[in-house]
Image (spheres, rainbow, N blue to C red):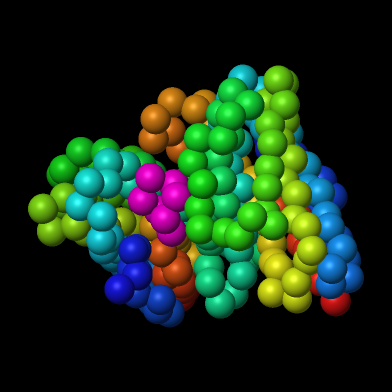
Amino acid sequence: QKEVEQNSGPLSVPEGAIASLNCTYSDRGSQSFFWYRQYSGKSPELIMFIYSNGDKEDGRFTAQLNKASQYVSLLIRDSQPSDSATYLCAVENMRFGAGTRLTVKP
Amino acid sequence: KAGVTQTPRYLIKTRGQQVTLSCSPISGHRSVSWYQQTPGQGLQFLFEYFSETQRNKGNFPGRFSGRQFSNSRSEMNVSTLELGDSALYLCASSSGLNNSPLHFGNGTRLTVT
Protein backbone atom coordinates (compact mmCIF):
# COMPACT_ATOMS: atom_id res chain seq x y z
CA GLN A 1 0.00 0.00 0.00
CA LYS A 2 1.35 3.40 -0.96
CA GLU A 3 1.76 5.90 1.86
CA VAL A 4 -0.31 8.56 0.07
CA GLU A 5 -2.87 7.58 -2.54
CA GLN A 6 -4.72 9.75 -4.98
CA ASN A 7 -6.94 8.95 -7.93
CA SER A 8 -4.62 9.54 -10.86
CA GLY A 9 -7.47 10.65 -13.09
CA PRO A 10 -7.73 12.25 -15.42
CA LEU A 11 -10.69 13.99 -13.85
CA SER A 12 -12.72 16.03 -16.27
CA VAL A 13 -15.38 18.54 -15.21
CA PRO A 14 -17.28 21.24 -17.12
CA GLU A 15 -16.58 24.89 -16.45
CA GLY A 16 -18.52 26.12 -13.44
CA ALA A 17 -18.84 22.69 -11.83
CA ILE A 18 -17.36 21.47 -8.56
CA ALA A 19 -14.19 19.40 -8.83
CA SER A 20 -13.57 16.95 -5.98
CA LEU A 21 -10.08 15.59 -5.41
CA ASN A 22 -9.41 12.91 -2.82
CA CYS A 23 -6.37 11.64 -0.98
CA THR A 24 -5.85 8.89 1.61
CA TYR A 25 -2.79 8.35 3.76
CA SER A 26 -1.45 5.46 5.78
CA ASP A 27 0.39 7.08 8.71
CA ARG A 28 -2.27 7.72 11.36
CA GLY A 29 0.08 10.03 13.26
CA SER A 30 0.40 12.53 10.41
CA GLN A 31 -0.24 16.11 11.43
CA SER A 32 -0.09 18.36 8.38
CA PHE A 33 -1.58 18.11 4.92
CA PHE A 34 -1.00 20.20 1.84
CA TRP A 35 -2.44 20.55 -1.62
CA TYR A 36 -0.13 21.76 -4.38
CA ARG A 37 -1.05 22.55 -7.96
CA GLN A 38 1.39 21.81 -10.75
CA TYR A 39 0.87 23.08 -14.27
CA SER A 40 2.53 21.12 -17.05
CA GLY A 41 6.22 22.01 -17.21
CA LYS A 42 6.06 24.12 -14.05
CA SER A 43 6.90 23.63 -10.39
CA PRO A 44 4.30 22.85 -7.73
CA GLU A 45 2.67 25.80 -6.00
CA LEU A 46 0.77 25.77 -2.74
CA ILE A 47 -3.02 25.84 -2.92
CA MET A 48 -4.01 25.07 0.66
CA PHE A 49 -2.85 23.48 3.86
CA ILE A 50 -4.87 21.99 6.70
CA TYR A 51 -3.89 20.71 10.11
CA SER A 52 -7.16 20.21 11.99
CA ASN A 53 -10.16 18.00 11.36
CA GLY A 54 -12.96 19.69 9.46
CA ASP A 55 -13.14 22.14 6.59
CA LYS A 56 -10.95 25.05 5.65
CA GLU A 57 -12.09 27.46 2.97
CA ASP A 58 -10.08 29.89 0.87
CA GLY A 59 -11.96 31.51 -1.97
CA ARG A 60 -13.12 28.84 -4.38
CA PHE A 61 -11.08 26.15 -2.62
CA THR A 62 -12.11 24.04 0.38
CA ALA A 63 -9.86 21.50 2.04
CA GLN A 64 -11.44 18.81 4.18
CA LEU A 65 -9.60 16.62 6.67
CA ASN A 66 -10.82 13.53 8.47
CA LYS A 67 -8.02 12.07 10.57
CA ALA A 68 -10.12 9.17 11.86
CA SER A 69 -10.69 7.98 8.28
CA GLN A 70 -7.26 9.14 7.15
CA TYR A 71 -8.41 11.11 4.16
CA VAL A 72 -8.08 14.65 2.96
CA SER A 73 -9.90 16.20 0.07
CA LEU A 74 -9.90 19.37 -2.00
CA LEU A 75 -13.03 20.87 -3.48
CA ILE A 76 -12.80 23.47 -6.23
CA ARG A 77 -16.01 25.39 -6.73
CA ASP A 78 -16.91 27.21 -9.95
CA SER A 79 -14.09 25.41 -11.76
CA GLN A 80 -12.32 27.41 -14.46
CA PRO A 81 -10.24 26.23 -17.42
CA SER A 82 -7.25 27.83 -15.67
CA ASP A 83 -7.69 25.24 -12.89
CA SER A 84 -6.63 22.52 -15.34
CA ALA A 85 -3.48 21.09 -13.77
CA THR A 86 -2.17 18.20 -11.70
CA TYR A 87 -3.04 18.43 -8.01
CA LEU A 88 -0.62 16.88 -5.55
CA CYS A 89 -1.58 15.81 -2.04
CA ALA A 90 1.29 16.01 0.43
CA VAL A 91 1.53 14.66 3.96
CA GLU A 92 3.96 16.59 6.14
CA ASN A 93 5.72 17.69 2.95
CA MET A 94 7.65 14.43 2.87
CA ARG A 95 5.14 12.03 1.34
CA PHE A 96 3.41 12.96 -1.88
CA GLY A 97 0.66 11.30 -3.81
CA ALA A 98 1.09 10.63 -7.52
CA GLY A 99 -1.24 13.52 -8.32
CA THR A 100 -4.65 13.86 -9.92
CA ARG A 101 -4.80 15.47 -13.33
CA LEU A 102 -7.79 17.78 -13.58
CA THR A 103 -9.18 19.09 -16.86
CA VAL A 104 -11.87 21.78 -16.82
CA LYS A 105 -13.67 21.96 -20.15
CA PRO A 106 -15.11 25.32 -21.34
CA LYS B 1 10.71 39.19 -2.64
CA ALA B 2 12.78 36.93 -4.87
CA GLY B 3 11.64 33.33 -5.13
CA VAL B 4 13.62 30.14 -4.76
CA THR B 5 16.46 30.03 -7.26
CA GLN B 6 17.94 26.81 -8.57
CA THR B 7 20.99 26.50 -10.76
CA PRO B 8 21.66 25.22 -13.29
CA ARG B 9 18.34 24.73 -15.05
CA TYR B 10 19.59 21.88 -17.22
CA LEU B 11 22.44 19.42 -16.91
CA ILE B 12 23.64 16.54 -19.03
CA LYS B 13 26.05 14.12 -17.40
CA THR B 14 27.52 10.75 -18.18
CA ARG B 15 26.95 7.64 -16.11
CA GLY B 16 29.54 7.39 -13.33
CA GLN B 17 30.13 11.14 -13.05
CA GLN B 18 29.02 13.27 -10.13
CA VAL B 19 26.93 16.42 -10.10
CA THR B 20 26.24 19.31 -7.73
CA LEU B 21 23.02 21.30 -7.79
CA SER B 22 22.50 24.61 -6.05
CA CYS B 23 19.51 26.22 -4.38
CA SER B 24 19.04 29.70 -2.91
CA PRO B 25 15.95 29.94 -0.70
CA ILE B 26 13.58 32.83 -0.25
CA SER B 27 15.14 35.48 1.95
CA GLY B 28 14.41 34.70 5.59
CA HIS B 29 13.62 31.04 4.99
CA ARG B 30 15.80 28.72 7.02
CA SER B 31 14.65 25.35 5.72
CA VAL B 32 15.55 23.88 2.35
CA SER B 33 14.16 20.56 1.09
CA TRP B 34 15.10 18.60 -2.00
CA TYR B 35 12.85 16.39 -4.12
CA GLN B 36 13.23 14.15 -7.14
CA GLN B 37 10.38 14.11 -9.64
CA THR B 38 10.04 11.45 -12.34
CA PRO B 39 7.04 10.38 -14.43
CA GLY B 40 7.12 6.91 -12.92
CA GLN B 41 7.72 7.65 -9.24
CA GLY B 42 6.22 11.10 -8.89
CA LEU B 43 7.59 13.53 -6.34
CA GLN B 44 9.92 11.88 -3.83
CA PHE B 45 11.47 13.51 -0.79
CA LEU B 46 15.27 13.42 -0.61
CA PHE B 47 16.16 15.43 2.51
CA GLU B 48 15.57 18.63 4.44
CA TYR B 49 18.12 20.98 5.91
CA PHE B 50 17.44 23.49 8.66
CA SER B 51 20.08 25.74 10.16
CA GLU B 52 22.87 23.82 8.42
CA THR B 53 21.71 20.47 9.84
CA GLN B 54 19.92 17.66 8.09
CA ARG B 55 16.56 17.46 9.84
CA ASN B 56 14.78 14.81 7.77
CA LYS B 57 15.86 12.25 5.21
CA GLY B 58 14.01 10.20 2.62
CA ASN B 59 14.78 6.71 1.34
CA PHE B 60 17.51 7.43 -1.16
CA PRO B 61 20.95 5.78 -1.31
CA GLY B 62 24.01 7.43 0.14
CA ARG B 63 25.06 8.62 -3.32
CA PHE B 64 22.64 11.46 -2.72
CA SER B 65 23.92 13.98 -0.23
CA GLY B 66 23.42 17.59 0.61
CA ARG B 67 24.53 20.43 2.75
CA GLN B 68 23.38 23.84 3.84
CA PHE B 69 25.47 26.92 4.38
CA SER B 70 25.16 29.63 7.03
CA ASN B 71 23.27 31.87 4.60
CA SER B 72 20.69 29.03 4.14
CA ARG B 73 21.78 28.31 0.57
CA SER B 74 21.92 24.59 -0.09
CA GLU B 75 23.67 22.22 -2.43
CA MET B 76 22.80 18.68 -3.39
CA ASN B 77 25.38 16.25 -4.70
CA VAL B 78 24.85 12.99 -6.54
CA SER B 79 27.89 10.77 -6.99
CA THR B 80 28.40 7.86 -9.36
CA LEU B 81 25.47 8.83 -11.52
CA GLU B 82 23.16 6.14 -12.87
CA LEU B 83 20.78 6.31 -15.81
CA GLY B 84 17.89 6.14 -13.34
CA ASP B 85 18.98 9.40 -11.73
CA SER B 86 17.65 11.29 -14.73
CA ALA B 87 14.90 13.44 -13.28
CA LEU B 88 13.73 16.89 -12.36
CA TYR B 89 15.28 17.89 -9.04
CA LEU B 90 13.24 20.40 -7.13
CA CYS B 91 14.33 22.50 -4.22
CA ALA B 92 11.80 24.07 -1.88
CA SER B 93 12.22 26.50 0.97
CA SER B 94 10.07 27.25 3.97
CA SER B 95 10.26 29.22 7.18
CA GLY B 96 11.35 26.08 8.95
CA LEU B 97 8.56 26.16 11.49
CA ASN B 98 6.93 22.78 11.88
CA ASN B 99 4.54 21.97 9.05
CA SER B 100 5.08 25.23 7.18
CA PRO B 101 4.19 25.30 3.45
CA LEU B 102 6.80 24.86 0.77
CA HIS B 103 7.85 27.32 -1.93
CA PHE B 104 9.38 25.49 -4.88
CA GLY B 105 12.09 26.58 -7.26
CA ASN B 106 11.92 25.98 -11.01
CA GLY B 107 14.00 22.84 -10.74
CA THR B 108 17.10 21.40 -12.36
CA ARG B 109 16.52 18.93 -15.18
CA LEU B 110 19.27 16.30 -14.98
CA THR B 111 19.83 13.91 -17.86
CA VAL B 112 22.27 11.03 -17.40
CA THR B 113 23.50 9.35 -20.58
The verdict on residue A94 being magenta is: yes
What residue is at 84 percent from the left and 72 percent from the top? B15
- The number of discs equals 0
Can residue A92 be seen at all in this image of the molecule? yes
Q: Is residue A96 above or below residue B22?
A: below
Can residue B111 be seen at all in this image of the molecule? no
Q: Position of residue A41 (x, y in %)?
A: 67, 64
| Residue placed most toward the observer, B9 or B41 | B41
Quadrant into which the N terminus of chain A falls? bottom left
What residue is at 49 percent from the left and 28 percent from the top? B96
Q: Position of residue B29 (x, y in %)?
A: 59, 25
Side (left or right) of A63 relative to B47: left
Q: Is residue B106 above or below residue A12?
A: above
Give the residues in magenta. A90-96
What residue is at 63 percent from the left and 26 percent from the top? B52
Residue A76 found in image quarter: bottom left
Q: Position of residue A93 (x, y in %)?
A: 44, 47
Q: Position of residue A72 (x, y in %)?
A: 25, 56
Q: Is residue B54 above or below residue B36?
A: above
